[in-house]
Image (spheres, helix red, strand yellow):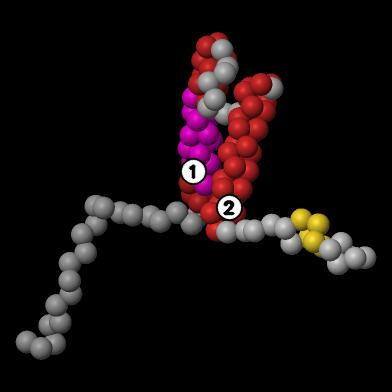
Amino acid sequence: MVMNEDTYEEVVKFRLSRMSVYIVFSSLLVVFIALTMAIILLTPIKYYLPGAGYGDAKQVREYRSLKIKTDSIENAMRQQEQFIKGVKKMLTGEAVKLDTTVLELPRIDSAGD
């Protein structure tokens, strides 16, 4: 209910129920979704959305090619880093020296004989 502050008369009277509030919010949601879809479909924004499928075939092939090259370069860099770490360990003497030709037998105390 909306009242006039000077005369305290009823100007407008609203009656809210759960159903009317639900209908209003549902309508606003539908309008918002429709407005968002219209903005995306009718403006150049659609070209900036990934996976929307609006790029031409040449761009898609180029993107895939660049993605494959980037992945292979990352793998090569990772392998180089591991190699350099191994060389640094060898030069500083931190590398574990494993000798598989020496077989160490358990000692048997001969004092108990």
Please tell me in which quadrant of the rendered image residue 112 appears. Answer: bottom left
Q: For this rendering, which residue is in front, 2 or 102?
A: 2
Q: Is residue 97 left or right of residue 8?
A: left
Q: Which residues are magenta?
A: 68-85
Q: Which mark is residue 82?
A: 1
The quadrant in which the C terminus is found is bottom left
Q: Residue at x 53, y 54 (%)?
A: 19
Pointer 2 residue: 20
Marks 1/2: CA distance? 66 Å
Q: Residue at x 49, y 28 (%)?
A: 72
Position above or below: 38 against 102: above
Position above or below: 106 against 58: below
The quadrant in which the N terminus is found is bottom right
Q: Residue at x 56, y 12 (%)?
A: 56
Image spot of residue 74 (x, y percent): 53, 34
Report if residue 48 lies within the magenta region: no
Q: Which mark is residue 93?
A: none
Image spot of residue 48 (x, y percent): 64, 26
Indicate which disc, 1 or 2, sits on the residue closer to the N terminus: 2
Q: For this rendering, which residue is in front, 90 or 15?
A: 15
Position above or below: 65 against 18: above
Task: Check disc 1: other Cα within 10 Å, few if <14, some if 14-19, many if 20+.
Answer: few
Nearer the camera: disc 1 or disc 2: 2
